[in-house]
Image: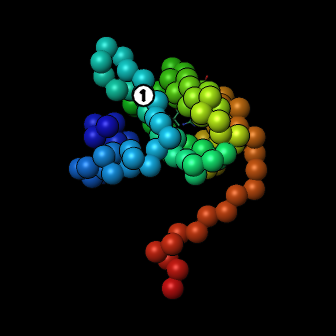
Amino acid sequence: MVELVRAHGGSPVPGWWDRIRPHSLGWVTARVAGTLVGFVNVAWDGGDHAFLLDTKTRTDHQREGIGTLVVAAAAEQARAAGCEWLHVDFRPELRPFYLDACGFRETEAGLVHLPSLS
Ligand SMILES: CC(C)(COP(=O)(O)OP(=O)(O)OC[C@H]1O[C@@H](n2cnc3c(N)ncnc32)[C@H](O)[C@@H]1OP(=O)(O)O)[C@@H](O)C(=O)NCCC(=O)NCCS
């Protein structure tokens, strides 16, 4: 995970995944010859709603269908776990990925950056 986060220009914080994992419904990984190349985390409200977070494909394996596959597996497992809705938010340039390749439908959503609240 540390290597995957670094590959995307992120700054992995030691213990990040250990802290997040207990709040997760589940997660999907993709590996090639033992190397982690794809990841998505599924957060959960404990009921009908699941939320995709941190979808990542290793840079040298992008555009090979890995992201689509891990998201499809996450959706199938969330459905099997009894969830009714799977949410995701994303930057505009990723519309072809989430809406076209992964099959999400467009919806209104809102976001607040809490530290910016005065
Ligand atoms: C977004 C991301 C997970 C996609 O993973 P991927 O394994 O490359 O995706 P796929 O190969 O399954 O792509 C399927 C289709 O989605 C679209 N797509 C994929 N990545 C895209 C991108 N960066 N921009 C626009 N469209 C994209 C394309 O239509 C693609 O089909 P094509 O390769 O035939 O053109 C990957 O680019 C990534 O890790 N990005 C950096 C981290 C990030 O921004 N994550 C999203 C957090 S919300």
Quarter where residue 8 is shown: top left
Locate residue 72, reporting x and y percent. Answer: 60, 27
The residue carrying mark 1 is 29
Seen in the image, is 53 located left or right of residue 97?
Answer: left
Residue depicted at x 46% and y 74%? 115
In this rendering, does residue 30 appear at all? Answer: yes
Residue depicted at x 75% and y 56%? 108
Color encoding of the figure: rainbow
Residue depicted at x 30% and y 22%? 35
Residue depicted at x 58% and y 51%? 45
Secondary structure state at the residue bearing disc 1: strand
* Residue type for callout 1: Thr
Locate residue 77, reporting x and y percent. Answer: 57, 29
In this rendering, is residue 21 above or below 109? Answer: above
Q: Taking the image as four quarters, which one is ligand 1 found in? A: top right
In the displayed orientation, state which residue is furthest to the left: 14
How many labels, in total?
1
**Quarter of the image with the N terminus in it:** top left
Decide: few, some or many residues near mark 1? Use Cα within 10 Å; few <14, some 14-19, many ≥20: many
In this rendering, does residue 57 appear at all? Answer: no
In the displayed orientation, state which residue is furthest to the top: 33
In this rendering, is residue 71 above or below 108? Answer: above
Seen in the image, is 71 located left or right of residue 41?
Answer: right
Locate residue 102, reporting x and y percent. Answer: 65, 31
Quarter where residue 21 is shown: top left
Q: 80 or 56: nearer the eye?
A: 80
